[in-house]
Image (tube, coloured by chain):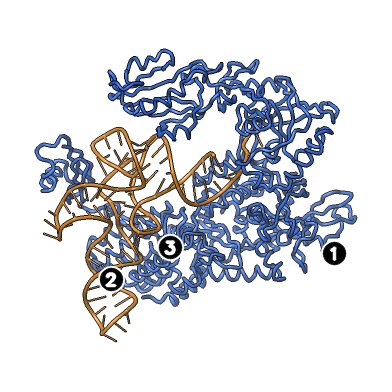
Chain colours: A blue, B orange
Amino acid sequence: MYDHKDIDKKWQKRWEDEGAFKAEDESDKPKYYCLIEFPYPSGDGLHMGHPRSYTALDVVARKRRMEGYNVLYPIGWDAFGLPTENYAIKTGRKPQDVTRENTDTFRRQLKSLGLSFDWSREINTTDPQYYKWTQWMFLEFFRAGLAYKKKMPINWCLSCKIGLANEEVVDGTCERCHGPVEKRDKEQWMIAITKYADRLLTDLDTVDYLPKIKKQQQDWIGKSEGAEVDFEIESSNIQHSTSNKLKVFTTRPDTLFGATYMVLAPEHELVKKITTEEQKSEVEKYVATARKKSDIERGDATKEKTGVFTGAYAINPASNEKIPIWVADYVMMGYGTGAIMAVPAHDERDFEFAKKFDLPVKPVVIKDQDQSRSFVMGVDESEIKKLGITIVEKTDDGFYKILIPFDRINAYKEFIREKMQPGFWNEFSTSNGFYFVFKHKDGRLEEMELNAETNDLIDKYGILFNDEAPREKPENVYLWLAKNSFYGEILIHTEVGVAINSDFLNGLSTAEAKDKMITWLEENGKGKRAINYKLRDWVFSRQRYWGEPIPLINCDNCGWVPVPVSDLPVVLPEVDKYEPTDDGESPLSTITDWVNTTCPKCGGPARRETDTMPNWAGSSWYFLRYTDPHNNKAFADTDKLKYWTPVDLYNGGMEHVTLHLLYSRFWHKFLFDRGHVPTSEPYARRHSHGLILAEDGRKMSKSLGNVVNPDEIIGEFGADSLRVYEMFIGPFEEPVPWNTNGLIGVRRFLDKVMKLVPLIGGSEPESVTRALHKTIKKVTEDIEGFRFNTAVSQMMIFVNEVNSDGQISEKSLMEFARILCPFAPHVANEMAFKLGAQDLLETHSWPKYDESLTVDDTVTIAVQVNGKLRATIVVPLNISQADAVESAMKQVNVAKFVEGEPKKVIYVKGKLINFVV
RNA sequence: GGCCAGAUGGCGGAAUUGGUAGACGCGCGGGACUCAAAAUCCCGUGGUAGCAAUACUGUGUGGGUUCGAUUCCCACUCUGGCCACCA
């Protein structure tokens, strides 16, 4: 048992005294910038998730240093934010003081883990010397015209009387009081991130992110291509004029002839303008109700559609038909134009709505006539499954290929007969039979169309609808079934096909029809090609205290005027009460002597903006500040930025992959366009870690009482036990439950490591040498691949090997200490010290391995008979096939099963021999 | 509802250009040391049968391809995560 308390302290002191982890600004070495998402210093202190990410990158950083890189592995605090502010409201303490205490705790805890952060570069987003530059960057957005003010609906808690962030709305209620939340319009500062949507998407090709991370970014940006179409409006309430157009976005302009009504989102500005007198009260009632619904309620796609007719009509620009305009909350104001053309024949939501309100459904696309699956019948997936039929193929356009074992076809004949009844077919069907594919035993496929009248198939196979044996019995029967039906209601959810009922588009494929329609719209001035993104502009205002003040001044004469750079930072003034005011303004608005100021431009009386920034602001650029944290002339020196950026490796949680990562990339691209940073992407490589769950498999949380405290673990088992355990616990990207027993196992391993010291001698068995080289190789490769768990496992194997052999050379043990060092730096240094090392292990170089020593000179070969393992033989590495086979045949248990000459022998060098008999 | 990821002993997990399933760790059982316990060390440990050699069986379910499938293909079930009426 080593004394972790002494050892931890001893080496942490030496690292600090020797400045072992200081990154050099001027260096001939290649640079490596290694970054973890800086923590939010919450009052609860460090939780078990932090060390997982930090240790992993610490392992990489320490390895890189030993490999000769100049490594920057910095740390700081993302300290603005709601929890601290809420705590301040509750206790009446200053957020500044609370933050200082929390960061002190975090710093102490992180230091106790022996992480190789460069503490001299510590930053804090709430430091005025830091947020001075956040404010400066905001003004850059403002000057570039990307920051603008707009009325936005915000979440408003009726009982707390405050605006809530989306994250604070839980199940449609206020997170704090569980009271009702509604939408309220409020003027907000916005930043036009959508201007960068396309670049944020295409530049993903230039970075090395995990595929799932890229995917989430793409989905969040949500690009779709289509057309914007203008519809003329006719209403008894408004004058018909060219200015009264209803603009919609659609990805399917080819279905324009099928648009039989229009829908506006309840918040749409045209609702008031076009609603007729007769419909007015009903529409107003509906809009008011919709407003009270939370996003969650509205977003529930399973609930029944609701809506109200406005009394107004639009003219379908293609067909010139007069179609009704409705208001319904299934249309969202935030996407596209907040209005849609409804094509009920080809959109499920529109269809559902049309069914309920008895609106016309006009099919304009049918299946491609050239495909033999062109019949239409009413079968759906659940019906097929109920019969226990296997679906072997499902097409995008609603067809199922099913498999029926031939000898069971009678069981399904009733089903098939029913589906073949005349009367199913309709004018769009060109074929009134089924399309079978028979698969014969020899693999040959035979296709046949079964006609209800001719019953060719019955003729040919006899048994199909009676019980006689077939002349030639096929193995399986495949049958194409279509999900959609024309009987009852007309409905086709055909994704793509051929246009019908569409005048000049008739006969064109969907892709051709789209193009032709867009051209037609453009030629006739009725619309244009358009691209839409799900991504919305960034709501940048918070009516809160604990954030960076937005550095703008409102002057009656000059409008919004930036605070001059010389007056930055605009420091957060101290207030007595941190609650937002009754009207939802920031607490800052009550400090009149701060709010009232003079206009920097005209000198007249003016008022400061009292909104603050979201805490995504400070975290959007923090990695730039690390390159030059104490600069007071610029956010960072250009040369230093050139040397250090981009970040070579960035790790964080999946929960930040959409917002933070996207905001940060956008922010960086903007700075790049303004010439402030040398690269257009901030992070060259992005990885993510999985959560550490509680022992019960649930999330660790204070309210569940299942939190494990890192201080206690470090106190009892030492920093290295926690570090190695968190690396060993499971695959780095997966969530894994905490298990204190597992940690004890790791501690035993470290004790065993310390016990290797007395085993040193001048020589060692070859098995130890080979184990060492295998271990160096595996650990080297596993660190690069983020497979920390198997790297630790390999080191355990090595230690077990040395223990059982009882001897190791001093040189070998020293090499082992070096590869252990990134994982367990205290133990590794202590061991090296005991072996006589004067320097810190961190100054040593990363060991190399000899490839020839990573393989043994004998191999164990599996001997199988018909694929079943019957014996194993140990043979020299380079044994010939003939010798190996001969040796295998000699095995009693093999000979027993082979009996005579095998039909075939499969030999995989160094792996196995399989006798086929 | 969509997308993504996953399903392997009592538990965390290992192994995939298809080639000895269960590495490593935990737990458990047995033994040594001890007056005793803890710690430590040694042996065993997927299931069934057998004293054993060994046989059969086994990677969510059903099928397929293959000499051979945890790995590839098809269908399904379940779990986790993210998004959610995106026109």
Residue at horizontal 65 percent and vertical 67 percent from the top: A99
Residue bearing mark 1:
A593
Q: Amino acid at mark 2?
A: Ile
Instruction: Name the quarter where the N terminus of chain A is drawn.
Output: bottom left
Q: First in sequence, mark 2 or 1: give its number.
A: 1
- Dot 3 and dot 1 within a common chain: yes
| Mark number, residue A441 | none
Q: Amino acid at mark 3?
A: Pro
The chain letter under disc 2 is: A
The chain letter under disc 1 is: A
Residue at horizontal 72 percent and vertical 56 percent from the top: A157
The chain letter under disc 3 is: A
Q: Is residue A460 above or below residue A901?
A: above
Q: Secondary structure at mark 2?
A: strand
Q: Residue A794: percent from the left, percent from the top?
A: 34, 59
- Camera-side mark, 3 or 1: 1
Residue bearing mark 3:
A822
3D distance between C-alphas at marks 2 and 1: 75 Å
Circle 2: is it few (<14), some (14-19), or many (20+) Cα within 10 Å? some
Q: Is residue A200 above or below residue A828?
A: above
Please name whichever residue, A332 or A752, is drawn nearer the observer in this view of the structure: A332
Q: Secondary structure at mark 1?
A: helix
Q: Secondary structure at mark 3?
A: loop
3D distance between C-alphas at marks 3 and 1: 54 Å
Residue bearing mark 2:
A760
Q: Residue A687: percent from the left, percent from the top?
A: 50, 51
Q: Amino acid at mark 1?
A: Asp
Dot 3 and dot 1 residues touching (CB under 8 Å): no
Residue at horizontal 88 percent and vertical 50 percent from the top: A556
- Dot 3 and dot 2 within a common chain: yes
